[in-house]
Image (spheres, helix red, strand yellow):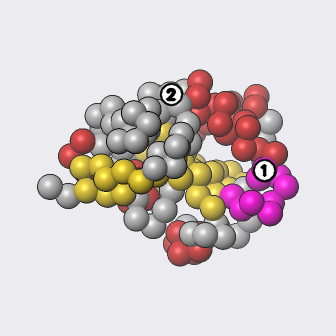
Amino acid sequence: MTTFKTECPHCHGKNNVPVERLSDQANCGRCKLPLFDGTPITGTSENINHLLKSNVPVVIDFWAPWCNPCVGFAPVFEDTANEMSGKIRFIKIDTESEQNIAALYQIRSIPTIMVFKDGKRVDIINGALNKTQFSQWLTQAIAK
């Protein structure tokens, strides 16, 4: 059985998740809260490829802690993740700590938001958006 590691978005505990059970409702071994719904997941080089194989669309926010627009956009991303729980998987990738992923996806400005379906990128947008703009863009991107 192949597994990958992911961090709980609630308690930050490390969890091994069987790849075969990625679509199931996985809970954290420590706090017992859901690993993949309602709160953005921290994307890492260890888990990103597995997370992109989701049976639901995936939205990634490429950001950095020193970026004021990124910090300002974070509540919009988190609120939307909570509202769309179970329909879309939300991932945040810190471009400072995950420079290899940032290079792989050719991130040149932040925040950069990408939407993936079936592991393939279907849309991308650069810059922070307000809640209405982000929701409208996301709805259109998911429909592609």
Front-lying residue, 144 or 112: 112
Q: Residue at x 58, y 33 (%)?
A: 81
Residue 71: image tag: 1
Q: In the rendering, at what x and y percent does residue 6 appear?
A: 41, 53
Q: Please indicate, yes or no, whether residue 133 appears anywhere in the rendered image.
A: no
Considering the image in quadrants, where does the N terminus appear? bottom left
Front-lying residue, 121 or 31: 31
Quadrant position of residue 54: top left
Quadrant position of residue 59: top right
Q: CA distance from mark 1 to mark 2?
A: 21 Å
Q: Residue at x 25, y 56 (%)?
A: 3
Q: Residue at x 31, y 53 (%)?
A: 16
Residue 57: image tag: none
Front-lying residue, 109 or 22: 22
At label 1, the amino acid type is Val
- Quick one: SS at disc 1? helix
Q: Please indicate, yes or no, whether residue 98 appears anywhere in the rendered image.
A: yes
- Quick one: SS at disc 2? loop
Give the extent of the magenta segment.
63-71
Q: Residue at x 43, y 58 (%)?
A: 48
Please give left or right for residue 46 compared with residue 77 in the image: left
**In this view, which residue lies farthest toward the left?**
1
Residue 85: image tag: 2
**In this view, which residue lies farthest toward the right?**
68
Question: Mark 1 near mark 2, Cβ–Cβ under 8 Å?
Answer: no
**In this view, which residue lies farthest toward the front?**
30
Q: Residues within 10 Å of mark 2 (few under 14, many from 20)?
A: some
**Taking 116 as reference, is 55 above or below it?**
above
